[in-house]
Amino acid sequence: MSEEMTAEQLRRRIADLDAEIAELRRLDGDAQARRGEDGARSEGSVENEELATELTGIAENEAVIDVLTQRRESLEEKLRAAR
């Protein structure tokens, strides 16, 4: 960012990040819930490759959430400093 963001721009960006994080957490929760659907009554309908893909997606989602959370914290620090 070559030019400084105004306090209002920082607030909007934080709100955007909050929305992104909330959506990723919702998707992560959905994926976690689907993981448990292949329970005792199952006849092995989830293939190992499918499970591995699902687990990889969950891990990637968590990594993105971590990056977005760090970015949000950085913007909050800038906002506090601008006051």
Image (cartoon, helix red, strand yellow):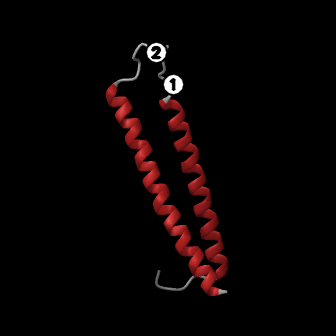
Please give the residue where the numbered disc 2 appears in the rendered image.
42
* Rendered view: 56 above or below 4: above
Q: Position of residue 75 (x, y in %)?
A: 56, 74
* Rendered view: 38 above or below 80: above
Secondary structure beneath disc 1?
loop
Residue pictured at 48% horizontal, 16% vertical = 40
Label 2: how many Cα within 10 Å (few below 14, some 14–19, many 20+): few
In the rendered structure, the answer to whether residue 58 lies left or right of residue 6 reads left
Give whichever of 16, 21 is nearer the camera. 21
Residue pictured at 49% horizontal, 13% vertical = 41
Whichever of callouts 1 and 2 sits on the residue coming sooner in the sequence is 1
Please give the residue where the numbered disc 1 appears in the rendered image.
37
Name which quarter of the figure residue 13 lies in.
bottom right
**Circles 1, 2 touching at the beta carbon (< 8 Å):** yes
Report the label total: 2
Secondary structure beneath disc 2?
loop
| Quadrant assignment for the C terminus | bottom right
Residue type at numbered disc 1:
Glu
Q: Position of residue 54 (x, y in %)?
A: 41, 36
Q: CA distance from mark 1 to mark 2?
A: 8 Å
Residue pictured at 51% horizontal, 31% vertical = 34
In the rendered structure, the answer to whether residue 27 lies left or right of residue 59 reads right
